[in-house]
Image: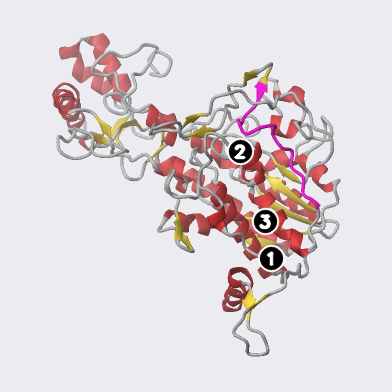
Amino acid sequence: MIKNMKWLLLVSLTFVACNNDDSDTPAEVPVVAGSAVFTKYIALGDSFAAGYSDGALFAKGQSNSYANILSQQFTAAGGGAFTTPLMLDNIGGFSSGGVQVAKFPTRLTFIGATSSPANVPGVSATSITTHLTGSFSNMGVPGAKSFHLIAPGYGNLAGVFATPATANPYFARFASSSTTSVLADAVAQAPTFFSLFIGGNDVLGYATNGGVPTSQDPVLGDDITPTATFNFAYNTLVTTLTANGAKGVVANLPYITTLPHFTTVPYNPLTAKSIGKNNEAVGLATIKLLNAQLYGPLKQALTALGAGDRINLLSETATSPLLIKDETLPNLGAQLASIFTPTLGAQTAGAYGAIFGQARQAKTTDLILLTTKDAIGAAPTAANSGLGIAPAFPLNAFGISFPLQDKHVLIPTEIAEIKTATDAYNVIIAAAAEAKGLAFVDTRSVLTQLASGGIRFGNFTMTSSYAVGGAFSLDGVHPSPRGYGLIANIFIDAINVKYGSTLRHVDLALYPIQYPITIQ
């Protein structure tokens, strides 16, 4: 380990060495490939490999993907041409018939003096039905899970429009046929070197849906991919890619719950008055009214039922936690309805029981989704209240007087499910790298650094803080241009160590942390 650290410092940080003539002028270490062969580099993966950023795929983001950055650094060590299935502009997303496809909106940006990002105006020139000819080196497919990369027909355009969808429009743009797989098209290009960074989406859909599975079928829904499925898919990928002697680099998976999408919105933003950008100013008069008419009676009733720790009065001077539904709690709906019937009547008391039977205030162990920010304080509707009706005052504010629903929050049991799956995937990835002699990148450790103090380079420090930390884009999940540069650099470190290469880092200061409204 000490030897590896010394080697990293030598080849990937400074790239200079002293001359034998005792001159004070350093000489650059020549860039060599070592035992790697970069002649034909293929990148396989998901949205990270593709360069997805700010909630969309667009041309400039693709050019700043870590895969494209790597290919540029490979050039000095014998790397060949690297091709990308570029989108047609920097609007982002797909259009159909001249109209933006709602499921694939334009990219996010800050517009004017707004405090929250918004979608850039316009319609993407990239039609969802357009097919590109030729083969492409960057085979990153946004939305792809591990097993999707080995699935025949994942690029079948007809499957994109099926209900439910059985194919991916990003792969459909450049698949060699309607029956091929991402892996088959990659191997057909006879790569001499590959990168594989896949598995994030195997838990991401479940996480961004607040731990609510949309299907028990992991192929069609957002459930967590079973470990056995991931194991089969991943080892199929690695075994097939290395069958003809290609070398490569693989990366493990970070805990996605450390991404800004899950850490930006505090569990306790409710205040009597505005005290910061992440608070929700409820107003002192409203807090007094809610304590008298809602929180007080609920606290009293729950205490009588032995569950008084679920809810406390809102603070008039400090921050208060959000009100959430926790489906793991015993449902006290019938008991609450019985207690409230004498004062509220059977019908209203029944509604209170249904709403608050599994309600509690959020804790530090809960993660509020970035997308939930817009829901806090909004009025529940008949469609999203779970009651079939739109509740009236005082129950007309999500997170304040009406519990945020399962889809809005990751509770500890759901977080544990995601961590357990990620740990299992990472064991599989590390074992495959060891078995096939591949370079291994520990992205989990890097993201942990970003989330706990940051990573310093030059006069800058990158952190995982939303919008201002420099590492992540405005969707809170995907990297910024600078974040992709960081990924490329840690991939370079791993390649240099494993193969004796002397590839150079890119200068992260040259990469912006956000894209402007108009990209030149």
User: Which secondary structure, mark 1?
Assistant: loop
Q: Assess whether residue 418 is covered by the magenta stretch.
A: no
* Real-space CA distance between mark 1 and mark 2, rounded to the nearest whole angstrom: 29 Å
Which secondary structure dominates the residues rendered in magenta? loop
- State which tag comes first along the sequence, 3 or 1: 3
Q: Going from the N terminus, do you reach mark 1 or mark 2 first? A: 1
The residue that appears at 76% across and 40% down in the rendered structure is 182
Q: Is residue 389 left or right of residue 283?
A: right
Mark 3 and mark 1: Cα distance apart in space: 17 Å
Q: Which mark is residue 503?
A: 1
**Residue type highlighted by circle 3:** Val
How crowded is the residue under tag 1: few (<14 C-alpha within 10 Å), some, or many (20+)? many
Q: Which percent across, then down, holds residue 1?
A: 58, 75
Mark 3 or 2: in front is 2
Tell me the amino acid under the disc marked 2.
Answer: Gln
Q: At 23% from the left edge and 28% from the top edge, which residue is drawn?
A: 282
Q: Tell me the amino acid under the disc marked 1.
A: Leu
- Residue labelled with disc 2: 520
Left or right, 3 with respect to 196, comes to: left
Which label sits on residue 250?
3
Residue at the spot 31% in from the left edge and 42% down from the top edge: 363
Residues in magenta, as a range: 81-95
Q: Quadrant of residue 133?
A: top right
Residue 145 at x, y percent in the picture: 65, 40
Residue 294 seen in the figure: yes
Q: Is residue 451 left or right of residue 86?
A: left
Where does the image place residue 294, in percent across and percent down from the top left?
Answer: 19, 23
The spot of residue 463 in percent (x, y) is: 44, 53
Q: Is residue 79 above or below residue 176?
A: below
